[in-house]
Image (cartoon, rainbow, N blue to C red):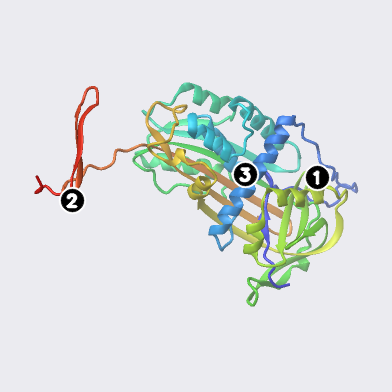
Amino acid sequence: MKNQVFIILCLLTFAVLSSCSKDNGEEPDLTPENLTLTAKSSEVIAYSNEFGVDLFTKVALAENKNFMLSPLSASAALTMLLNGCEEDTYDQLKATLKYPEQMTISEINEVYKNLVSQLLVIDPKVKLALANAIFYRQGFTVKPPFLSTMDNDFNAEIAGLDFSLPSALTTINKWASDNTNGKIPEVLNEISPEAVMFIMNALYFKGDWSYQFDKDLTSDRAFYTDGSNSVNVSTMKGEVGSKVTGGAGYSAIELPYGQTNFTMIVIVPTGTLTDCTASLDAEKWNTITSAFDGQEEYGELTVYMPKFKFSYEKYLNKQLQSMGMIDAFDPYLADLSGIADASIYVSFVKQNTFVEVDEKGTEAAAVTTIGIELTSMPPQPQVFTIDKPFVFAIRERTTNTLLFIGQVVNPLDN
């Protein structure tokens, strides 16, 4: 079918789990375990999904190629940063992350700990790992309460490194690789002379479809990249358990992993991909997921799905700024005084991701890296020329008392 382009969208983790094949003659358990959530946790998850969908749609506006983001990884790293923000910088980032206005940072941290601890063990068939880290420049004084929170609430690896040595870059990239099973081997290719800290989150998951595709049925099929052009793509075929729904401008399918706690949702536009992503928001996402949740069983359906594999890297500064995270990126407005007394700001937020989908299942990984740098003074001019109308003033410097102020339009006029 023309104009079919698959969009990969994940909830907090669209993870990866085990096969539905029989084991010792017994049917596998496909009953999902329920997470124990408080009312606050459920509220935070709903708003965090809104953050993730908003971030996706804003990136989609700038990309006409394959890409994948991890809302959970981004949210985790930015929440770590939130613990070091104060005043307007804190309020803006909290609003960007969609956290309820009345929630305190301690409550937010507690929700994070509770959610992650359960996600990691909710399905014993899943290989799901999440790691956090704080790497800071040796000699840079980080406030102990911030480091204590990173240790206690985020279980972060904390290390001071000599950023001037090549070994620091090696250590940071090795951490990313080790925590993504080697799928993201590099997140930095250099360390800025002004860099003082990197706040990092890594997310990795791997496993099998609940209902696997038969490799023998995989064949090349046409995939229409636009209305008139197509390419031949290795396409899986299977009679697999799934749920389907649809609405104005799209049809959607849900495919489960393992014991069905985690699923992949694929949205296929009836029109163009651009129109579909432009209209995707939290309300539509909730409509789609609610439609799936209203169906009790995964009915058997013939599914054709292309295999795919790609890596992606994206600096998210512009998207996050457009979502309200403004002051943190401004060297002269950022208030990160919860991290250090020095004048510092966020120089970048970026994600590196990897995904591979085949007949057996899915492997995916993400690393979110937040760079923190010292605010540098603007360079002093080597030449200063006054050759146009100007303002002048006379003041008392120790009190900053303004005595005179005026302007000169033409120095020859008297």
Q: Picture quarter containing residue 76?
A: top right
Disc 2 to disc 1, C-alpha distance:
74 Å
**Residue depth check, mark 3 versus mark 1: number of the one nearer the observer:** 3
| Residue 85 visible here | no
Name the residue carrying label 1: 259
User: Extreme front residue here?
Assistant: 414
Q: Secondary structure at mark 3?
A: helix
Residue 388 circle label: 2
Mark 3 vs mark 2: which is more N-terminal? Answer: 3
Mark 3 vs mark 1: which is more N-terminal? Answer: 3
* Percent of width and height locating residue 366: 58, 47
Which amino acid lies under the numbered mark 2 shown in the image of this protein? Lys
Whether residues under marks 3 and 1 lie with C-beta atoms below 8 angstroms apart, the answer is: no
Which amino acid lies under the numbered mark 1 shown in the image of this protein? Gln
110 or 262: which is nearer to us?
Answer: 110
Residue drawn at x 39%, y 26% as measured from the top left: 341
Residue drawn at x 75%, y 64% as measured from the top left: 215
User: Extreme bottom residue here?
Assistant: 228
Mark 2 vs mark 1: which is more N-terminal? Answer: 1
Name the residue carrying label 3: 51
Q: Secondary structure at mark 2?
A: loop
271 or 262: which is nearer to us?
Answer: 271
Disc 3 to disc 2, C-alpha distance:
49 Å
Disc 3 to disc 1, C-alpha distance:
27 Å
Left or right of 60? Residue 340 is: left
* Percent of width and height locating residue 148: 53, 23
Q: Is residue 318 positioned above or below 114 on the image?
A: below
